[in-house]
Image: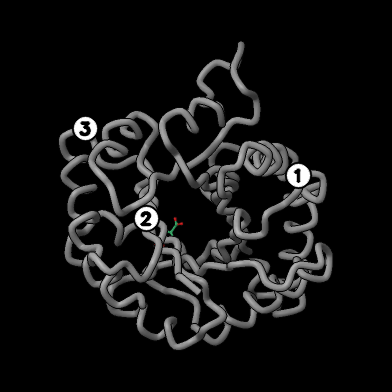
Amino acid sequence: MKKIIAFNWKSNPVTVKAAIKLAKTVENAIPQKKYSEVVIAPPFVFLEDVGKAIKKAKLGSQDIFWKNNGPYTGEISWHQEKNLKVKYAIVGHSERRQILGETDGMINKKVLAALKSGLKVILCIGENLTIRKRGKKAVENFIKSQLQKDLKNIENCKLKIENLIIAYEPIWAIGSKHPDTPKDAVEMINFIKKVVSGKYKVESVKTLYGGSVNGKNIKNFLKYKEIGGFLVGGASLKPKEIKNIIQNTK
Ligand code: PEP
């Protein structure tokens, strides 16, 4: 099955010119004979220009609002995103949960709106360091609870399982230069697959790993077929890393 590499640029870069340049770096690194799906999630303000600069890569958003349009100051709706040719929506990133106070209830509304609109959702889940230190059972309980809250009622969306992607991102590994061990990440990914398939009777949900992945350490994760791809933050801004990540992911 095709792997997904999703580049989350967060609040970078600063100008549209730099965003187009970075998008072209990604585009040029994708081989003609494509073997993985590469997604670029730029800041909203660059969606349109980045969308025009790419052909092989797919456009993603870093968030989505659940209403179509209306009096929702500062929010960008799923409908507006679809009109900009966005194909993937990242939902529930830990920075939005922690810095902006996004709750599981809000994330669930976003997941439902995205799935109903036909967007592919990359739902981010993952534990913080305090939970991790309590051991594996505590992490599993936390992950299970996040899945139950964030995916509530998705059975009403006529779910196409290929439209639901889960990114396992332990918070302590994000931007820390200390990725999870591939073995531990795979254990959690298998747990996530088990929870989702048990509840929704789907064979397997594509599950990505995210947290300090770079062009070098990615090889250790790629040994495990359970990992459906990667969500990449910091390294997605560095041309050399971009090339290595894309070219190493077969
Ligand atoms: C992220 O923020 O989703 C992420 C994985 O960031 P980084 O690759 O920088 O750890």
Q: Amino acid at mark 2?
A: Phe
The image's mark for residue 16 is 3
Q: Quadrant of residue 212?
A: bottom left
Q: Secondary structure at mark 1?
A: helix
Image quadrant in which the C terminus is located: bottom left
In front: mark 3 or mark 1?
A: 1
Residue 154, x across and y down, in percent:
77, 48
Q: Residues within 10 Å of mark 2 (few under 14, many from 20)?
A: many
Q: Secondary structure at mark 3?
A: helix
Question: Is 171 in front, or is 1?
Answer: 1
Cα separation between marks 2 and 3: 17 Å
Residue 232, x across and y down, in percent:
39, 61
Q: Amino acid at mark 3?
A: Val
The image's mark for residue 7 is 2
Q: Quadrant of residue 189?
A: bottom right
According to the image, label 1 marks what residue?
157
Q: Secondary structure at mark 2?
A: strand
The residue under the point 52% across, 44% down is: 89
Q: Is mark 1 within 8 Å of ligand 1?
A: no
Q: Is residue 56 left or right of residue 174?
A: left
The image's mark for residue 109 is none
Residue 54, x across and y down, in percent:
26, 45
Return the disc, 3 or 1, that comes first in the chain's sequence: 3
